[in-house]
Amino acid sequence: LTLQTYATNSTANPTPIVLSNPTKEVSGFSFLFTGDPGTIYTVQFTTNLSQPDWNTLLVTNIPVSPAKVTDTNPPGGTRFYRVRRNGP
């Protein structure tokens, strides 16, 4: 699992979390997400949306937004991702 960061994004109000740019790469599967730098986020995944349990892929305090997440061990089938802001 790797986390890369890109251009900064600063605002007084919480930035909406938006996942974008899903990409299959040689190193795995990656996507970008927006958020507030300095805020802790949990990236989770599941293979079945009808089940209530999600697995944690990464917990990170992003230094800039958007941040790039790469899942270096995606399954051969479908995997769903979500990003949650920790705290208030």
Image: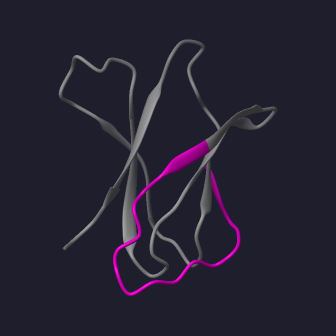
Whether residue 57 sits left or right of residue 65 in the image: it is: left
Please say if 79 is above or below 34: above
Q: Is residue 50 magenta?
A: no
Return the x and y of residue 26 as percentages of the image width and height: 81, 32
Is residue 27 at least partly visible in the picture? yes
Pick the front one: 7 or 28: 7
Residue 24, by quadrant, is top right
Kindly identify the residue that appears in the image at 33 percent across and 17 percent down.
Answer: 48
Return the x and y of residue 4 as percentages of the image width and height: 68, 62
Please say if 21 is above or below 86: above
Give the extent of the magenta segment: 1-20
Kindly identify the residue that appears in the image at 49 percent across and 79 percent down.
Answer: 37
Kindly identify the residue that appears in the image at 70 percent across and 74 percent down.
Answer: 7
Return the x and y of residue 49 as percentages of the image width and height: 29, 21
Give the residue furthest to the right. 26
Q: Main secondary structure of the magenta part?
A: loop
